[in-house]
Image: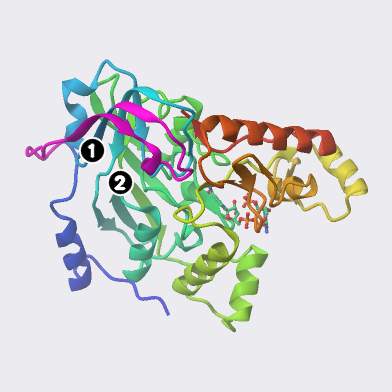
């Protein structure tokens, strides 16, 4: 059974009180000193553990810090959890490390809870917190690495849910307009692992820094168990009517089995998009490869599983120098130790070439390259 808490509930009040000083926006007047440094090693700040230095680095812990003049007028890169990033070398500019904390129930109406979180909150911890307080809806996105602020940029998704479906709005500092903007869902133009932030390059160019995100979580909850891995895990656990936390626990278990922990084996999660191809190509491939997984899309095209293609091309568990494709999930590119951005590019290109030669399908990388 799910318990919903109102804003008057003492647990919610306590949770909000803990966050009260940690947020938010231009209204606050007290600006804590910035944590800044020169010539900073970025390898601890990207989950592929690639080497590279930033000419300048600043940790941002309040939105107001972004509005200071000293940050304008130089190349910037906005860094979140570094879990979707390929560092190709040194960055001759300023890295802004978004570490704004805070999470709270913003409001509720008869249909939904509206939960706000600072851009620097760890995504998985945030999801677990919403579940603990009785606000389900994000459970299928458990254990995705990264931060709350980065989640809308690539519209993170897993097990039949994309974050855009639970998104209400976000606040961002616009360095060009020198103002805080509120960006609603339609403006975000969410697509498959895509948003206006990626399309317009606002993130990579350092034009906009997301400071907080509001999620809309409907009170009418139904389990989302479309993916076989989830149903199988719940069946193994003999759970017929799962709670949101049961689903989260099942997904955590599945992911821990299949995906490498970046702290042990540096990686950036899924390295390629699942290609969406014309139905005719999918049909002709299926004639040659009867076990080819195919997922028809609303527009008539067909989504193929990039991991399956990579595995069939012989890359599961295979390395090229210090970079390889993970032995338990071929879609994950891993740094076996000491790799550089060039090593990643080389392995990426080799995998793309082999998949193209075998299936006539182009693979596009998911992470951004800096
Ligand atoms: P999987 O179960 O091995 O399946 C391979 C692919 O087939 C998935 O990428 C998934 O596409 C697709 N698929 C499977 N069942 C489907 C269904 N019922 N309907 C439509 N498509 C289906 O996948 P996996 O690699 O272990 O990943 C499991 C989930 O975690 C996937 O949704 C994956 O995208 C997600 N994930 C996301 C990230 C990220 O956001 N960066 C990182 C790692 C894994 P989709 O990818 O479109 O779901």
Which residue is tagged 1? 60
Secondary structure of residue under mark 1: strand
Given residues 254 and 3, the one toward you in this image is: 254
Q: How is the image coloured?
A: rainbow
Given residues 295 and 254, the one toward you in this image is: 254
- Residue lying farthest to the bottom in this orientation: 238
Which disc is residue 294 wearing?
Answer: none
Q: Position of residue 160 (x, y in %)?
A: 59, 56
Count of number-bearing discs: 2
Which portion, as a residue range, is magenta?
26-55
Secondary structure of residue under mark 2: loop
Q: Is residue 27 magenta?
A: yes
- Residue lying farthest to the top in this orientation: 73
Residue located at (16% from left, 35% from top): 34
Which residue is tagged 2? 120
> What is the spatial separation of the Cα atoms under label 1 and label 2, in whole angstroms?
9 Å
Looking at the image, residue 20 sits to the left or right of residue 222; the answer is left
Looking at the image, residue 149 sits to the left or right of residue 352; the answer is left
Q: Position of residue 350 (x, y in %)?
A: 71, 34
Is the C-beta of the residue carrying label 1 under 8 Å from the nearest atom of ligand 1?
Answer: no
Q: Is residue 6 above or below residue 321?
A: below
Residue 118 visible? The answer is: yes
In contact (CB < 8 Å): disc 1 and disc 2 = yes
Residue 222 visible? The answer is: no
Residue located at (46% from left, 59% from top): 143
- The mark nearer the N terminus, 1 or 2, is 1
């Amino acid at each position: 059974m799910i318990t919903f808490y109102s804003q008057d509930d003492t647990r919610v009040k306590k949770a909000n009180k803990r966050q009260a000083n940690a947020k938010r926006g231009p209204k606050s007047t007290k600006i804590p000193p910035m944590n800044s440094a020169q010539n900073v090693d970025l390898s601890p700040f990207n989950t592929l553990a690639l080497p590279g230095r930033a000419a300048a680095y600043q940790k941002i812990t309040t939105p107001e810090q972004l509005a200071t003049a000293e940050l304008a007028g130089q190349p910037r890169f906005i860094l979140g959890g570094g879990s979707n990033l390929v560092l190709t070398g040194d960055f001759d500019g300023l890295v802004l490390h978004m570490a704004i904390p805070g999470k709270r129930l913003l409001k509720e109406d008869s249909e939904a809870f509206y939960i706000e979180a600072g851009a620097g909150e760890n995504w998985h911890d945030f999801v677990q917190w919403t579940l603990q307080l009785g606000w389900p809806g994000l459970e299928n996105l458990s254990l995705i690495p990264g931060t709350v602020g980065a989640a809308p940029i690539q519209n993170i998704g897993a097990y039949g849910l994309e974050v855009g479906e639970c998104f209400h709005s976000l606040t961002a500092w616009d360095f060009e307009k020198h103002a805080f903007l509120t960006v609603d869902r339609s403006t975000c133009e969410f697509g498959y692992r895509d948003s206006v932030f990626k399309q317009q390059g606002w993130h990579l160019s350092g034009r906009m820094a997301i400071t907080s995100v509001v999620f809309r979580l409907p009170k009418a909850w139904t389990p989302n168990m479309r993916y076989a891995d989830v149903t199988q895990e719940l069946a193994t656990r003999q759970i017929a009517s799962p709670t949101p936390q049961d689903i989260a626990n099942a997904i955590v278990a599945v992911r821990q089995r299949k995906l490498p922990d970046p702290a042990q084996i540096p990686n950036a999660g899924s390295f390629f998009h699942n290609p969406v191809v014309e139905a005719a190509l999918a049909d002709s491939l299926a004639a040659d490869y009867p076990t080819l997984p195919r997922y028809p899309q609303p527009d008539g095209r067909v989504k193929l599983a990039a991991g399956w293609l990579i595995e069939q091309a012989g890359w599961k568990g295979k390395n090229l120098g210090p970079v390889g494709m993970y032995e338990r999930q071929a879609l994950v590119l891993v740094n076996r130790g000491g790799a550089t951005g060039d090593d990643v590019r080389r392995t990426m290109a080799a995998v793309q070439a082999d998949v193209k030669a075998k299936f006539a399908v182009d693979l596009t990388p998911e992470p951004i390259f800096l």
